[in-house]
Image (cartoon, helix red, strand yellow):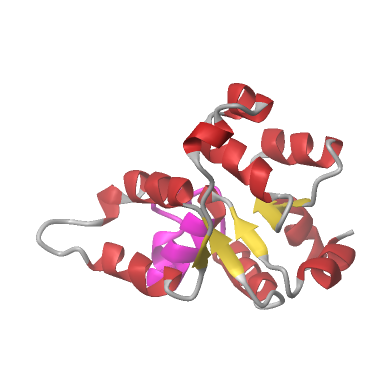
Amino acid sequence: MVNSFIKKFRERGILVDTNLLILLLVGTYDEKLISSFKRTIVYTVEDYRNLETFLTRFGKHYYTPNILTEITNLTDSINSEPNFSFFLHIKYVLNNFKEDRVSSDEIMQLKSFMKFGLTDAVNCKLSDNYLVLTDDLRLYSYLANQGLPAINFNHIRNFYL
């Protein structure tokens, strides 16, 4: 399954969900933080490296403004005033990503909005265009049951074992 998604979406691209993008950002910033930062403590340095390797298989990487909002809110404790080096790091890393956006008005009309809220409903909508990479089992299950392209990060862990 993973290989077929790689082939199909290599050129179209991959949308990286919030938690995994946080893992990527923290890992590229300082691998030692992965095991101590509250948002990445469930991951290992090996998970980060596998994620990074997996993402190189795609020509384009996407995030949404909603994902970026969640990232900045969930990682603000890494920054200490006046040192905003982690936010500068976010800017640097995401410079290699593309942003895609969907109108909130449009999203609020979808049943996925009522089920998930804004960020994941946008991810659902964009799964029409890109492969969605998430560690959110609920979101993954929903997308998979709808026949939409998604990979649960645990599939990546198994892929690299």
- Magenta segment, which residues? 21-44
Q: Residue 68's x, y, as percent?
A: 42, 52
* Left or right placement of residue 73 versus residue 19 in this view: left
- Residue 158 picture quarter: bottom right
Q: Residue at x 28, y 62 (%)?
A: 87
Q: Nearer the viewer, residue 11 or 56?
A: 11
Q: Nearer the viewer, residue 125 or 137?
A: 125
Picture quarter with the C terminus: bottom right
Q: Residue 36's x, y, as percent?
A: 40, 53
Q: Count the marks: how many?
A: 0
When the figure is inspected, residue 19 is found, relative to residue 50, above or below; the finding is above
When the figure is inspected, residue 91 is found, relative to residue 57, above or below; the finding is above
- Does the magenta segment cover residue 31? yes
Q: Residue 130's x, y, as percent?
A: 70, 58
* Left or right placement of residue 74 versus residue 5 in this view: left
* Left or right placement of residue 159 versus residue 45 in this view: right
